[in-house]
Amino acid sequence: MNLQNHIMDELGAVLRYTSEKHAKNKFDDESVKTESSIEQIRVENAISVILEEFNRDFEIDSDFPILRRDDHTMFLWKGIRHLGTSYECLDASRPWLCYWILHSMEILEEAIPTGTALEIAKFLGKCQCPKGGFGGGPGQAAHLAPTYAAVNALCILSQVTEDVFNILNRDTLYDYLMRMRTEEGSFKMHEGGEVDIRGTYCAASVAKLTNLCTEELFKDTPQWLARCQTYEGGFSGTPGLEAHGGYSFCGIAALILINATKYADIKSLLRWTVNRQMKYEGGFQGRTNKLVDGCYSFWQGGALPLIHMVLCANEDPAVSANSWLFDQRALQEYLLVCCQHPNGGLIDKPGKARDYYHTCYCLSGLSVAQHFVSGHLYETNVVGSPKNKVRSVHPVFNIGVNAVVIAQRYFSHQIPLNSSENNSTEQNSS
């Protein structure tokens, strides 16, 4: 290793949170107080208190911050079998709970017994509707969001046993996706439900994983997605609304899945997304002038590998060959220092309660920040103890890379349905 690389390695190992210069990154309201600026300063002050304690710990043990893997897995196992009354409000999101918990376990490399995998698949089968798609629970109406969650959960479980795919009815699933499609190429979330960009992504992800992509299913979809990109650069839920991190991820991921990235202004999306990383906190905000939130570690952080993918395909000379286009170490510091609940699980920001949603997307963002994968190039960048390293995720689907490979191999011999020819919109997204 030459001297320059050695120096860079040494500099890269320095934590932002331990630097005396870090405080200079705090928000400056320029003596104009607003409701937003007051809340921003309040969050930064809460983080400052945490950093004081962290810096004392770091002086004693330079392996800090440490991923509390055992605490998190204990929290996740508790949710597999029993949820408290506080989760009653998510009775219509039970496939989501399965996905959030299973994906978190997958990232933490927690083994799932075959019997448990088959039990979960059986439960998801009860959520499948006779006319296709999955509802939020047994006997509930089909909805694209829990359909996406159920298919992702099955793909994760297929790493234990491919028998879990036996519950999936592709015939009715395709019919359901076609019924959710609108004439303009968008997708409604359920019968009589709202149309927004989440539905398009959910439909594209499910179709891609189960080999159900057809020209008729995504006719005019790229054009509708392009109308959702705003003047700021991010994507909104529907044309004409405000750019939002979750919707932006759905927009660019859907375009990748249906091989239509030429419809996106990728440079504008890049500019908007990188500017959502907070200078002091290190995590991401979901919208302009909003607070940091751990879940956007994936919705924003996970969008940047997708943007990188498109830029590479366009042979853009500016893209790096060893890192994503954001501060990966800063994001890891925020997640490990500020978002770990002492009793397991991860949180939005200091002072918030733990839940399975934030646990899933904080860990997903941690994985993205640790692993750089571009073609044949692979680099890891792990903050803190080497034991903090987690499993790499596929940023398009947000499940493990191996789960994507197994699913696409399993369904590869089954041609798209209701189509006389195999006219799927194939795209190398894996």
Image: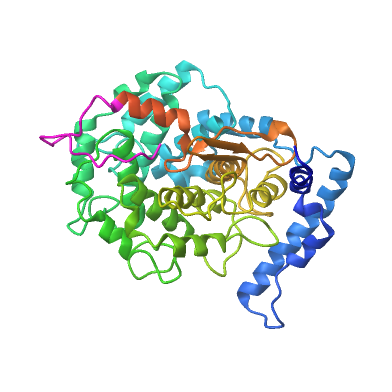
Residue located at (35% from left, 53% from top) = 261
Residue located at (21% from left, 51% from top) = 181
Residue 143 drawn at (x, y percent): 31, 45
Image-based side of 19 in relation to 402, left or right: right
Residue 50 drawn at (x, y percent): 78, 53
Dividing the picture into quadrants, the one containing residue 43 is bottom right
Q: Can you say whether 372 is above or below 53 in the image?
A: above
Residue located at (36% from left, 34% from top) = 151
Residue 381 drawn at (x, y percent): 66, 40
Looking at the rendering, the stretch of residues picked out in magenta corresponds to 411-430
Quarter holding the C terminus is top left
Dividing the picture into quadrants, the one containing residue 405 is top left
Quarter holding the N terminus is top right
Image-based side of 98 in relation to 148, left or right: right
| Overall secondary structure of the magenta section | loop
The residue most toward the bottom is 32
Looking at the picture, tell me which residue is in the foreground, 378 or 50: 378
